[in-house]
Amino acid sequence: MVKHLREFDDYAKIKPAVNQCEFHPHNTCPDLLNYCSERNIHFQAYSSLGSPRSRQALFKEPSVLEMCRKYDCQPAQLLLAWAINQNVSVLPKTVNLDHLKSNVKAANISIQKSDIDLLKNLKTVKRYCWDPTAVA
């Protein structure tokens, strides 16, 4: 949250180098992404694929499926590539070797800016993890 990062300006001698946030096409965090970019704070995504309970919402998103056909990839690869193509690093958790191999391939998928923007502007806006706005 931008509010939390602004608090560092008041008292921190060492500014943050990295900020982690839930980040995917249903939670694009534009204000936070811009704030981090302006202050040279690296933005790192967690839950790029949603949560285990909500993953299908992102994987079945019509625009995601359409782009998977266009870029010849799987939904998880597309979602990871979407973040990577915005200079956002990703932390996809897996204990499955096949998923790990598939996730690595996301780094080689180049997504057109118009497609990145289309996914940034989906009508569904939702967090699938905890809500940092509820923290003081």
Image (cartoon, grey):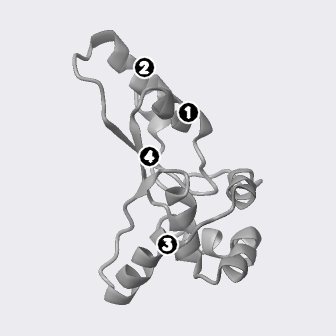
Q: Say if 89 sits above or below 15 in the image.
A: below
Q: Residue at x 67, y 57 (%)?
A: 116
Q: Tell me, yes or no, if residue 53 can be seen here.
A: yes
Which kind of residue does numbered mark 4 sit on?
Cys
Q: Residues within 10 Å of mark 1 (few under 14, many from 20)?
A: some
Q: Earlier in the sequence, mark 4 or mark 2?
A: 2
Relative to 84, is 20 on the left or the right? left
Which kind of residue does numbered mark 3 sit on?
Asn
Relative to 120, is 39 on the left or the right? left
Circle 1 sits in a helix, a strand or a loop, which is it? Answer: helix
The quadrant in which the C terminus is found is top left
Q: Earlier in the sequence, mark 4 or mark 3?
A: 4
Q: Position of residue 96 (x, y in %)?
A: 33, 85
Q: Which residue is mark 3?
A: 108
Circle 3 sits in a helix, a strand or a loop, which is it? Answer: helix
Measured in 3D between alpha carbons, the distance from the residue under mark 4 to the one under mark 2, in whole angstroms, is 15 Å
Given residues 120 and 3, the one toward you in this image is 120
**Which numbered disc, 1 or 2, marks the residue closer to the eye?**
1
Measured in 3D between alpha carbons, the distance from the residue under mark 1 to the one under mark 2, in whole angstroms, is 13 Å
Which kind of residue does numbered mark 2 sit on?
Arg
Q: Tell me, yes or no, if residue 52 can be seen here.
A: no
Q: Earlier in the sequence, mark 4 or mark 1?
A: 4
Q: Residue at x 58, y 61 (%)?
A: 82
Relative to 59, is 114 on the left or the right? right
Measured in 3D between alpha carbons, the distance from the residue under mark 4 to the one under mark 3, in whole angstroms, is 23 Å
Q: Which residue is mark 2?
A: 6
Q: Quadrant of residue 70?
A: bottom right
Q: Earlier in the sequence, mark 2 or mark 3?
A: 2
Q: Earlier in the sequence, mark 1 or mark 3?
A: 1
**Which numbered disc, 4 or 1, marks the residue closer to the eye?**
1
Q: Which residue is mark 4?
A: 21
Q: Residues within 10 Å of mark 2 (few under 14, many from 20)?
A: few
